Structure formats: C-alpha cells, structure tokens
Amino acid sequence: MKRRINKWSEIDWITIILYLLIVVLGWISIYSAVYNEEHDKIFDLSQRYGKQMILIFGALVIALVVVVTDNRFYSLFAYFIYAIAILLLIVVLLLGKEIHGAKSWFEFGPFRLQPAEFAKVGTAMALARYVSSKSFNIKNSKNVFNAVVIILIPAILIYIQPDTGSALVYFAFILVLYREGLSGGILLIGILMIVLFVLTLIIDKMIIIIALIVVGYLVFLIIDRNIKRFLIAALIYISLSGTFFGLKEFAGLGLSVYFILILSLVISGFIYSFFIYFYRIRKAVLIYMLMFGSIIFTFTVNYAFNNILKPHQQKRINILLGIDSDPFGSGYNVNQSIIAIGSGGFSGKGFLKGTQTKFEFVPEQSTDFIFCTVGEEWGFLGTSLIVILFTIFLLRILVLAERQRSVFCRIFGYSVFAIFLFHFVVNIGMTIGLLPVIGIPLPFMSYGGSSLWAFTILLFVFLRLDISRLEYFI
C-alpha cells in the first residue's frame, strides 16, 4: 500500500550538501585553472568557467526532474534506457565527431555530448533490473554470464571508439556482483591477474614461471596438509622436468626451457590425477589448473601489451612501472602534475597564484587533471579536503545502499558507489603518478557537461529510489 510523503523533507540532504560542495569547489578550481585576466568574471560565458556555470545550472534542473519522477519509472524502463544507451554508442561510432583520435562525441554547435558517460546510467539500471529479478541466482553460471554481458556490451563499444579509460570504468560493476554473492575467489583471481600482468612486464618471465610453480605446490601443501602427498606431487614434477632437461642437454632434444617447464606441469598433473581418484584430493586439480593457467597468462601478457594496447598506452604503463622515462613526451602530463601538486606544499601558493596552473604547464588541467590545480594553489590542506569530502560522500552512498528495502534499489546504489569509487581512485591516482593516465574525469569537479550531467543523474536517481523506501508500507 502506497502512502503520501514529502519528497523534499525525506530526501537525503547530507548527500546533496556534499554534492553541492564538491560541484562548487570544482567550479572554483576550473576558474583558477583557465583564468584569463581579460575575462576575470567567473560568470563570463565566453570562458570555460562561465560555461561550467550553465552546465551546473542544467545539472540542477536535471536533478529536480529526476526527483519528481515516479520511482517506478526507473525500474520499469531500465532495459529501454539501456537499449537507448547502446544505440547511441553505435551511432556515435558512425556519425560522431573524432576528437584526439576517438569517435566519442556528438557535436551540436558549441556543445558536445559523450554517450559513454550516460551509458553508465543505463548499464547500472539494466544490471539492477536483471540481478533483482526473481529468476536470477548468483550461483547459476548462466545468470552470471548474462549479467557480465550486460556490462561488457557498452564497455566493448566504448573501447572501439577508442576510449580505453571510459571502457575500464565498467569493470567496477564487478563490485556490485560481489556484493550480491559472487564468489570472492573470482574477485581474488581478477586482482591476482592484474598483479601478475604488472610483474610479467617488469620481471624476467622465467623467474615468474618458476615462482608460480613453487607457490602452487606450497598452496597445495597448505590446503591438503599432508606432507606425503605433497612430496609425491613435487617428486613427479621434478622427475619429469629433470628427465626432459637431461634429454635436452645430452640427447640434443630441441625443447625450450619454457616448454619443458609447462610440459612437465601438464604431464605431472595427469599422472597425479590417479592419486586424486584414490585420495579424493579434488582441490589439487584446481591448483594444477591455476598454475597452468597462470603460466599461459604470462605468455599472453606480452602479446596483449604489444598488440592490443595503443603505443601511447604502452608508453604510459612503462613510464609508471619505471621501465621507460619520458618526461617530455608520454610522461609529461604526470610529471608536470606531480610538480604542481608538490609545489603547493602544506597550504598552497594561494588562489590564482599557481605558476604551473597560470602558465598552462599541465595539459587538460581543467578536465582530467583538475586535482593538481587544487594541490598547487591550496596545498596539502586543499587536497586533503577534497579527499575527505569524497570519502564521506562515498561512505554515505554505501550507507544509503545498505538501508534499501528493494533489491533493485540496493543494486543500483552499489552501482553508483562502484562508478564513483573507480573515478575517484583512478583520477587522483593518475594525477599523483600512482596509476597510468587513462583519461577519466574527477566526478563533479572536472570541466564538462556530459560527465557532470551523467554523474548527477546517477546520484539523484539513487536519491529518488532512496525516498521510495518510505512510500510503501511493509
């Protein structure tokens, strides 16, 4: 049974106040980043800060419309909104304007629209609708596969543009599935793959393979807790690899060291499978598969790195890992950003007094690198304030998500949290040199209408859904 409530008294004003604070700080930072003495009025519409004012006003109008809309609209039309988002991603590939080598934008006179930003809203709604359906079971691999497809379709279309940064954001949705019961082992495997990817780029492949084999057998010992079976498994592998190395050395067998290590692992796994049957140590099969899969993964890393990633992306990763140094090329943005933030010291140089900002040493300083403007002019105090505000903001969304009565609302809330968390961590991480530059905005602070409006829709749809928990008697 539905009851009447006052939306404006029940809406979460704490989140709205945090939103407004971050938006205003972003507007001031944009003003400082692109300040023009000949156009010193912050309301000057010929400058980015004037245009951002219009975009902020538009965002507030959008927020109002979202809140007054019936909450059932978002669940009923979730798939339709998702389909529209996918259609726009396809159309932009065909008719979009190419900027910086990517077809990611529609251009309408002086205004641009980036469908990839709004596709996050559609994906969050569609995922919430599907996962909250009565037929969905997180233990069912087919259901999980369908959920992953919902996430991957927009991610792939965005990657084709190509916009790798925006595509990577969609992998944040894995946190949503994890909250709904997805095995933590899958999340752990994903993290380990990232770690293995990085290690493969900076450490000799032979060391990686040997380490994987040793770790795999040690894990087997820890899980099985039987020294006898561990010694049997290790002895089989050592005997096989020793035999192959002997044949290579003394019989001239033309096998590479890599091939011998992998072949020995495969054969020893088959031989040990007989012991698995008798002793029912079924986890050993999984360990052998993980070892074999991890070793094969190390061989695919170099191929993927050299053939899938673009040259500038390879360069950025190599610079981040310390493999290359290019302070005047691919590493220029990050290098200048670090200088700008570091030069701010504890309290900063003061408003409009940042030399790195004033003389435009950092490219994209009003968009992706807006955080370094805060660091230079307001120092450690200013950057700490931004980090604290975002942290409180994210924790508040988490609290709201957990108090939802509807599964759809909870899942959508966690999707909003995951998207904001990814943008916050990665954007700040890349400006201080901890993560590679992938070109994603800092929510509500970076210049741009598409990101501001899309983030606003995400947030206020969730706040509207949060109100709806009070509209029905249980």
Image (cartoon, rainbow, N blue to C red):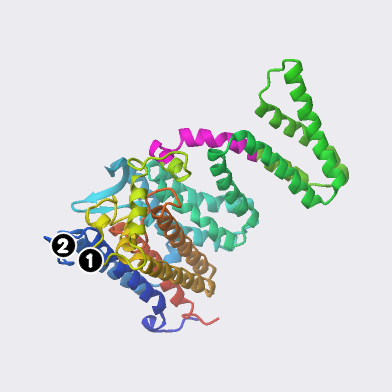
State the image coordinates of residue 430 (x, y, percent, origin top left): 41, 52
State the image coordinates of residue 131 (x, y, percent, origin top left): 55, 60
In the rendered picture of this protein, how many numbered marks are placed on residues? 2
Q: Is residue 4 above or below residue 157?
A: below
Q: Going by the image, does 210 lie left or right of 19? A: right
User: What secondary structure is the magenta-colored segment mainly?
Assistant: helix
Q: Going by the image, does 13 lie left or right of 402? A: left
Amino acid type assigned to the residue bearing label 1 in the image: Met
User: Taking the image as drawn, is residue 384 in sight?
Assistant: yes
Residue reaching furthest top?
252
Amino acid type assigned to the residue bearing label 2 in the image: Leu
Q: Quadrant of residue 269?
A: top right
Q: Nearer the viewer, residue 133 or 234?
A: 234
Q: Which of marks 1 and 2 precedes in the sequence?
A: 2
Q: Is residue 309 above or below residue 37?
A: above
Q: Describe the element under mark 2 as helix, strand or loop.
A: loop
Q: Is residue 354 above or below residue 462?
A: above
Query: Disc number at residue 146?
Result: none
Q: Going by the image, does 256 lie left or right of 51? A: right
On whether residue 349 falls in the magenta region, the answer is no
State the image coordinates of residue 63 (x, y, percent, origin top left): 33, 70
Instruction: Report the residue marked by disc 2.
Output: 45
Instruction: Report the residue marked by disc 1.
Output: 53
State the image coordinates of residue 103 (x, y, percent, origin top left): 31, 43
Residue at 13% across / 62% down in the picture? Answer: 39
Residue at 59% across / 37% down in the picture? Answer: 298
Tags 2 and 1 touching, CB below 8 Å: yes
Q: Which residues are magenta?
A: 294-315
Q: Going by the image, does 133 lie left or right of 417? A: right
Residue reaching furthest left?
38
